Image (cartoon, grey):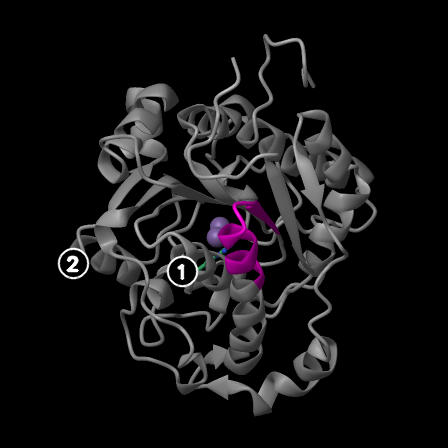
Amino acid sequence: METKSRFLSEPKTVGIVGCPFRGGQLRAGVDQGPIYLVQAGLAEQIEDLGWKVKFDGHHLFEGVERELALSRDEDVHGIVKNPKLVSRVCQAVSKSVEEHAKKGELPLTLGGDHSLAVGTVSGIFSAYPDACLIWCDAHADINTVESTESGNMHGMPVSFLLGIGSKLPMFDWLRPVLKPERMVYIGLRDVDKAEKTILKDHGIKAFSMHEVDKYGIGKVVEMALDHVNPQRNLPIHLSFDVDALDPSVAPSTGTPVRGGLTFREGHYICEAICETGLLVGLDIMEVNPSLPNIHDKMSVEQTVAIGCSLTRASLGRNTLSCSGSR
Ligand SMILES: NC(=[NH2+])NCCC[C@H](N)C(=O)O
Ligand SMILES: [Mn+2]
Ligand SMILES: [Mn+2]
């Protein structure tokens, strides 16, 4: 059963936006995530599902490593680390994502750390102002410039997109494209105290692991869609942080938290969103092939393989159909 997308052009095309970037957090290696995902054959796997794939190499983000080396004292705002760098990279990503989306292609952004979502979500909402956002993550990533305890920008993209907290001058290109009622979380289990207040004050809907246990993943995804997309007629962007999955399932990530989604629960979310025929943008974030330890080849292969299979599930792998049965 092939669902035809209401928003994408024919032939259905994925534009891969490879983002080897780690400036939104401190652990080395997450910049290698997109490289491993592509090397594992992700583009070919998507083609096997019947999509056309456009990929002309990863973003280069000239000078990132040099800036990261300098940034310790030069690129800081209070305790926020690398804001200029993150802004520059996200602006470039936003542009790529918007261009693909405006051509009727589905941008698939491979991270890299989750600060990149400032770029992906702003790009999607520029092309589809009435889109909604589904954020799968152990974390809420909604700290503001004031509330962040770590200063790591991968814990802040949602507040930037909503336009809450004080604005950093280097982000003057960014419009607050997102409204609190247009987004929903699935998988949360490690939310900072200040973030809990922000979620409550802005009335943001979240299905934590508690709700996943209580209702089951089928019901949770249905309730999440009812919240952001009651008529099932609006474009959907899915931002998937692989740490939403349990660390036993996806160990190679920078901020693992136990008690996460099972393999099937993670895939079910992607399949159910795919079935709506409304998916217009996808992020696979926070795959870090140098963790938990660079010699642990099994963990790395397992996590990279899951990044690929979540993508396939989102793009129409159907267990019972004859084509694309992987
Ligand atoms: N994208 C992520 N893995 N985010 C983790 C964020 C952790 C913590 N809440 C912070 O703000 O630093
Ligand atoms: Mn996370
Ligand atoms: Mn995240």
Q: Amino acid at mark 1?
A: Ser
Residue 192 location in percent, x, y? 34, 58
Residue 43, by quadrant, is top right
The label number, if any, that marks residue 126 in the structure image: 1
Viewed as shown, does residue 3 lie left or right of 176?
A: right
Determine which residue is flagged by label 2: 201
> Is 82 located above or below residue 36 in the figure?
below
Label 2 is placed on what type of residue? Asp
Name the quarter where the C terminus is drawn: top right
Q: Secondary structure at mark 1?
A: helix
Which residue is at a point 42% across and 78% down the rendered structure image?
Answer: 173
Q: From the viewer's perspective, is 147 left or right of 149?
A: left
Q: CA distance from mark 2 to mark 1?
A: 26 Å
Picture residue at 25% right of the left edge, 56% below the top: 179
Residue shown at the point (53%, 26%) measured from the top left:
267
Part of the protein shown in magenta: 96-109
